[in-house]
Image (cartoon, rainbow, N blue to C red):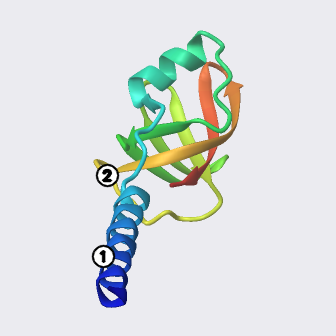
């Protein structure tokens, strides 16, 4: 009887471990697409801490704000470090701070 109980417990542990791995490995959906994010900024929504799926349209590695990944019409995702990405690449950014400079948004972010 103890042998069957041991096998049952071991099976339950393996099932729970497998469920835990699959849940933690799936990435949550970003809060915004690039287009939705730009619309939210234009409407004055609070976006700090939100995530954005960004598709890079152009890169300015030595802009006045730092390493600038351009997306959308007026979105500039800036960093002091080179994220090793190219135009056409996609990534998910967590917004840390947004500043509106002459109609363009300067977004400090953290890569997810």
Q: For the image shown, how many numbered marks are present on the structure? A: 2
| Image quadrant where residue 19 sits | bottom left
Q: Give the image location of residue 76, x and y in percent.
A: 54, 38
Instruction: Name, please, the residue furthest toward the front.
Output: 1
Q: Taking 13 as reference, is 48 above or below it?
A: above
Q: Which residue appears at 65% of the width and 39% of the height?
A: 49
Q: Secondary structure at mark 2?
A: loop
Q: Earlier in the sequence, mark 2 or mark 1?
A: 1
Residue behind mark 1 = 11
Q: Taking 6 as reference, is 106 above or below it?
A: above
Circle on res. 89: 2
Nearest-to-viewer mark from 2 and 1: 1
Q: Secondary structure at mark 1?
A: helix
Return the residue nearer the eye: 51 or 57: 51
Location of the N terminus by quadrant is: bottom left
Instruction: Name, please, the residue furthest toward the bottom.
Output: 3
* Left or right: 33 in relation to 3: right
Q: Taking 68 as reference, is 84 above or below it?
A: below
Q: Which residue appears at 55% of the width and 17% of the height?
A: 40
| Image quadrant where residue 25 sits | bottom left
Task: Measure the alpha-carbon separation of dots 2 and 1.
Answer: 43 Å
Q: Give the image location of residue 67, x and y in percent.
A: 57, 55
Q: Give the image location of residue 17, x and y in percent.
A: 39, 71
| Image quadrant where residue 32 sits | top left
Q: Which residue appears at 29% of the width and 83% of the height?
A: 4
* Left or right: 76 in relation to 24: right
């Amino acid at each position: 009887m103890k042998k069957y109980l041991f096998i049952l417990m071991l099976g339950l542990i393996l099932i729970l471990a497998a469920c835990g791995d699959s849940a933690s490995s799936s990435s949550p959906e970003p809060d915004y697409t690039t287009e939705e994010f730009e619309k939210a900024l234009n409407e004055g929504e609070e976006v700090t801490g939100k995530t954005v799926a960004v598709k890079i349209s152009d890169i300015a590695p030595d802009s006045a704000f730092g390493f600038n990944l351009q997306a959308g019409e007026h979105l500039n995702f800036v960093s002091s470090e080179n994220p090793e990405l190219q135009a056409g690449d996609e990534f998910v950014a967590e917004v840390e701070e947004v500043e509106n400079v002459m109609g363009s948004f300067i977004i400090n972010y953290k890569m997810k």
